[in-house]
Structure formats: C-alpha cells, structure tokens
Amino acid sequence: MFILMVVVFVLGYLAIALEHPLKVDKAASALLIGSLTWVIYILGSADILNLGFSTAWDDYLNLHPDANTTKGMQDFIAHSEILHHLGEISEILFFLLGAMTIVEIVDQHQGFKLITDRITTTNKVKLLWILSFLTFFMSAALDNLTTTIVLVALLRKLIADKETRWFFASMVVLAANAGGAWSPIGDVTTIMLWIGGQVTAANIIVQVIVPSLVTMIVPVAILSFTMKGDVVRPVLEGDAARDFTTNGERKFILGLGVSALLFVPVFKTVTHLPPYMGMLFGLGVLWVVTEIMHKKKEGDDKRRLSVVGILTKVDVPTVLFFLGILSAVASLQSAGQLAILSEFLDKNLGNIFTINIAIGILSSIVDNVPLVAGAMGMYEVATPETLSMISDPTQLAYIEHFVVDGMFWEFLAFCAGTGGSILIIGSAAGVAAMGMEKIDFIWYMRKISLLALIGYLAGAGTFYVQALIFH
C-alpha cells in the first residue's frame, strides 16, 4: 500500500502531463489522485503507519498513547491529518480564489486597458524584457501567484496568438518565481522560512536578489537571440470594443484592486492572520464599493460589472486542480514518502549546495511547500550554544551554515522558489498560468523547461560564487 500510493501519484502526474493526447482535463486527474492516495492510505493504515516513516503518526502517538489500533490509525488519518492538511490547502485555495476574483473585477471594469494602452511596443523581444522585469519586481511586492494571475490576464489584452501568449505566460511564470524567491513575502516557501525564524527579511533580500535576477535574465537573454517578429494585438469586437466604464471608473477600480492586493502582506504583518484573510478582506471591500458604484445601472452593464456576475467567469477548474494536486502531495507527506526522500538527499549528497539544488529540481515535480517543510524539520536552526559545544572545526564549519541567515537557509529559499519553474506544475504560479491559459504540459517541457533549467543553474552558480566571495 505504501508503494501503491506512489504508483498512483506517478500515474496521476502522467495523466496531467498527457492531458491533451488523453483529452482528459487535468483537474479531473488531479482530483482522482488527490482522493485515491488518501483512500489507499486509510485502507492500508496499519501496514503503512507500522513501517515507521510517518513523523506525524509518531507525534500523534506521543499525545495519544492508546491510538495504536486499527481504529486509532483510521481516526488519525480521517480526523487529524486530513483536517490538518485541508486547513493548509484551503488557505492557498481561498487566496487563489480571492486573487482571481479581484483580477477579474479589474478586468471587467476595463482597468487593464489603462496599462495595455501604455505598452505600445509590439516587438516580441522588447515586450518580453518589459513584462519580465515588471513581473520580477511585482512578484516581490505582491507574491508570485498573484502577480502571475494579474500578468496572464494582461497578456490576453496584448497578444492574440495562442502559442505566442503561452510563450509569454511561461516566461511570466519564470520571472514571477525568480522575483518571489528574494522577497520575504514573495513566495510561500520564503514566507515559511521568514516566519520560522531561519532567515531575516533584510538579509534574504541582500543575499538572494542577484542570483534571482540572473535566473530571470539568462532565459530572456537567450530568447532575445532566437525570438523574431512582432506580436499581433487582439481585435476587439462587439461589447469588448465598447467602453462601458468611464475613464474615472477604470482608474479608481484599477487603483483599488491593486491596493487590495498590495494590502495583503501589510494585513498579515499587522494582524498575524493568514494572507488569505487579507485577500478576502480586500475582495469584500471591492465588492461593496462596486455594488454602490453601479446601483443605478441596469441591464447588461449592471450584470457585467456586478461581482455576482463576475464570479461566474472565475476559473474554478484551476482551483479544483490545486485542491487535487495539493491533497495528493499532503497524503505522501503524512504517510512518510517525502520524509524518505529528504533523508535520501541528506545521506547521499551531504553538501548544502547539492542538497538544495536537488530540492529545487525536485520542487518542479513535488510541491515545494512540503519539501521546504521537510528540510525545516530535518535541520534545526543552529544557536550560539549549539556551536559552542562543537570542537571539531570541520563539523563546526558545516553546522554554521544552519544558523539564522545561514547559507543553507538562504540557498534553500532561492532553490525552492526558482526550481519549480522547470516544469509548469512545479509552482503555484505555473499551475495558475496553466489553468488560466490551458497551457499544454508537453509543450512547456519542449519549449520552456530547458530555458528554465539553464536559468536555475546560472542563478545557483551565481549564489555559489557570491558565497565564495563574501562568506
């Protein structure tokens, strides 16, 4: 049963990768593996948990010594683990749902028209550089997921051709993940390390911004030599060509929407509540304001601009895809397969650079959140007291990498944040872009994965050289 969970997970990933040849929507495949892995887990609970790989089960047993029975194991999975992981997954889903709705509200109010009207170039190379830098710095201020949702919505107004738009959306994913890695609020894994006390905000910015910038610039520079021609702007017809909001309304809603998104990290810092609460608060404010704005309008314009009508346009399959894939990964984390993977890396690599590079590459296959969580669980933050007890200089030099703002944690933030770009399903930003634009997994592998890998290794090399010079 333990191995069967992995087999189902791998087969599900293959079905997602082969979505277009199989003609089965990836959300359906994700939901299947998200439920089947938990079904196998609970049916084989006695066999799986008695193997001793689940740290969650060990912790549960310490609190409930009488739970070591078949019913106790089933209660642990059904009433403890599923609810625990569902709470974490729901935070991401509600964040995603809130962000997508805010972006859709701005879009329906023609707010993005103010931006697209200012991007006048149609030259592919110039447009690629503009959008990449815009994405890179936006994702540091917002986060990579929200930025990707905003920029992919923007691309629909700039590029008519589907495959060209796929190319630009993919490069947005690369730039968003790179931009999120160096900011304490830019990526969920960096947030985890910041909140966990492994890194401080100022230090992570200083140490990781240059490698992240290299990771973004190298693929864009390569494409600058191969990309030719101009993009074709979409031709607007019918209602799309009509201005059904005033210029003042467009500016106000764009400003309010962007403010709602930017307010999320401020809300989290002030209240210490999860980011999704700030996102839902922003959505609530925007909803009330638009209801008041349009209360005198009637007919199609009122339906088009009301949030109730806008909600029907939100991409629910993308949300369900997230739910399925994160549920499947959570089951592997709970049962212990990811712990085995972490231990394997530690024993067979044993070097902070190779371990983190491997974690980054693995994060393109497995969600980076449990990988980083596993690394945080495997390695404790070294304190001055810990260091004072070590007399061996070689061991001391190794343990020093694990102090607050140590090289291991900095490099982990970089690798986990940027490595997910190698495959489109390797990051929240990639999954969002894949869902919104229906990007083909195989197409991404053929066209983008090598570029992303080159950028990732170039950034990792930059971090290594930087470490040799400054540490």
Image: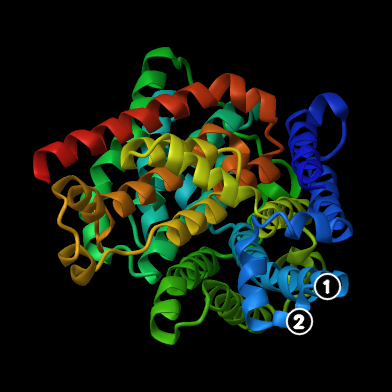
Q: In this view, does 7 lie above or below 196?
A: above
Say which element carries label 1.
loop
Residue 385 in percent (x, y) is at 20, 71
Residue 467 in percent (x, y) is at 18, 41
Q: Which residue sits at x=78%, y=37%?
A: 7
Per the image, the residue denoted by label 2 is: 66
**Whole-number angstrom distance, CA of label 1 to CA of label 2:** 8 Å
In front of the other: 165 or 85: 85
Kind of residue at disc 1: Thr
In front of the other: 57 or 190: 57
Residue 246 in percent (x, y) is at 56, 65
In front of the other: 461 or 153: 461
Q: In this view, does 20 lie above or below 317?
A: above
Per the image, the residue denoted by label 1 is: 69
Local crowd at mark 2 within 10 Å, few (<14), some, or many (≥20)?
few
Kind of residue at disc 2: Asp
Q: Which residue sits at x=36%, y=66%?
A: 194
Q: Tell whether label 2 touches label 1 (CB within 8 Å).
A: yes
Location of residue 99 (image quadrant): bottom right
